[in-house]
Amino acid sequence: MSVTNPLSPNKASRLKWKRLTPQKTGLVVKDVVCLPRGPFLAQLERHIVPRGKELAALTAMGMTARITIDCGWSANQMHSRLAMLFRGLFVERKGQRFSFTYIQSVQGSKVLFVPETPAEGWTGEQVLSISGHGALYILSHQDYPQAEPERSASETPVLNRKEFCPEASTERRPDEDHQLERPTQPHAGSTTEESTLDLDAILRLFRQENINGDVETDIHVRRRDVLHSALKAVRRPDFCFRTTPIVTFSGEETDGHEGPLREFFRLTLLELQESSVFEGLPGRLFLTYDLTALEARKYYEAGVLIGWSLAHGGPGPRCLHPALYQLMCGQNPSLDDFSWSDIADAEVQIRLQQLHSCTEVQLLPPSLCDWVSSCGIPGIYSAHSDEIPAIYKRLVKHYIYHRVANMISQFTEGLKSCGGLWDTVLTHWEVFLPVMTSTQQQPLSPEEFKMLFTACYSCPDSQLRAAEEATAGHWETVLTAISDGQADFSFENLLAFITGADHLPPLGFPRLISLRFYSQDASMSGVRLPYVSTCALELFLPRGAAAAADLLMLLSRAMREALGFTRFQTERDGEDGSVAVITSL
């Protein structure tokens, strides 16, 4: 089996075949077969598609995979996503990239050939065209595959934040609906080209296959006990994660459901982290060993809540310890640098610290050896000193993973009950790192935060325009002050105030946040504070703010005094005679 002249077009282009018209919108799932170069090409003397034993051999080597392709992907996006599938299988020196050539299967035959490259490159649409209804074939430029090396969490690809922050003009019509449907395309040769992950595509396809937007479920929530309200909903006999939750906070009214839904899932998962199913340091949590919670299926319910949130565009937990998450996904993380201080149990901390700092087995206290033996390592009594690091790693793995195997099983069972979401996570475990753990989570920069907004100005010839532009200028200075730590709140606090979500959701926001303006009412005795509409994604700032420091102070007060959702802009007098708008529509 062979591919004719694999690095350049050939006479096969004269073959007649029927061109297929791919679907113009939506996502398409494709099987991908990577044909390795070198010793494999030497055996390929026929121009046919690999089948039978040949295909089985490629599959066993990890040379086959599955990808979700968006017809609208650019050539760079298409190439980077395919490279992500196979580059770990090949020898890679520092700075070296995985490269390949697209191969086409002639419609109605088993012939493979190299097609001519389109002028715009192999975009998602072009790739779907050459693959037709079958698999997509590519030819690796590397010599031969190697066993995939173990990678630590620090070596995993970083999530390109541009997935959530598309380029946008700073001036739009007030009534324009800005849909954030596609990520910004990285420039050719960009260092982020191969690290851009398609988490957005994975979750959108999951929603497309599982969520029924035509069926709604009313969820009544008590703000002081959001987790209890969420658990009450999932314990209903008729609960179905596929229906659209319509969330109502007790005593509060809204003109929409997007804002309350985001706030509901955010607060639910925050309270879940403080519940009996998790323990440890913030952002580095483990599952507890609680038989009572296990019998009550609380770990299962925790998995359901997380799956429910992700299915409806809400946040993931972003709290699992990276080592635990990788073990749950069947990976083998390096535990050499595992910090014993991450463990919640003080007694276990002391024992792990003793073992970690010990250089001679003879110096280990008998009580510590007995404890190590009770954890399933009886060989501690006859171990050599050079075995201590390996024993330490086995102890850590036992304590955070094997000891709570039943809890983990119940937790993942809950995730799997939501349309098999855990199976999706296992398939794309690296992609879900920033969703399930705090890995790769970086504070928003002023530039990234600013990209979430579009300013809605009055007409250029309006007398209000100059005052609005002055406020917008102060707004940019305020963002810099927040980044420099000169404010008593963070970007995450401000984002939660405006949208109900304290981080960028995995699927992004449905539109850009509108930066709007209002005029102070001279008849009022005080100052009207900034206010928001979480459903419409709008932030209202006062026109003609005197200075950035004044605007910062007003935003700080508005955030402190916002009490929740209500339909009308209810006002109350502040202690200094000012008027605080405390609504969040």
Image (tube, helix red, strand yellow):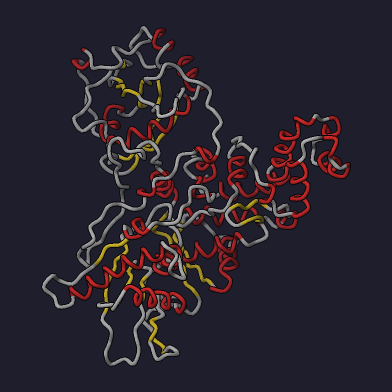
The part of the image, by quadrant, that contains residue 328 is top right
In this rendering, would 158 be left or right of 525? right
In this rendering, would 316 be left or right of 399? left
Q: Position of residue 92 (x, y in %)?
A: 45, 25
Q: Position of residue 131 (x, y in %)?
A: 31, 27
Q: Position of residue 535 (x, y in %)?
A: 37, 68
For the image, the number of numbered tags is 0
The part of the image, by quadrant, that contains residue 42 is top left
Q: Residue furthest left?
A: 461
In the depicted structure, whether residue 68 falls above or below residue 116: below
Depth check, front residue: 132 or 372: 372
User: Which quadrant: the N terminus?
Assistant: top left
Measuring 31% from the left and 60% from the top, which residue is drawn there? 512
Measuring 32% from the left and 69% from the top, which residue is drawn there? 538
Measuring 28% from the left and 40% from the top, which residue is drawn there? 187
Q: Is residue 16 visible?
A: yes
Depth check, front residue: 133 or 556: 556
In the depicted structure, whether residue 517 falls above or below residue 383: below
User: Which quadrant: the C terminus?
Assistant: bottom left
In the depicted structure, whether residue 62 falls above or below residue 265: above
Q: Position of residue 418 (x, y in %)?
A: 52, 50
In the depicted structure, whether residue 123 falls above or below residue 209: above
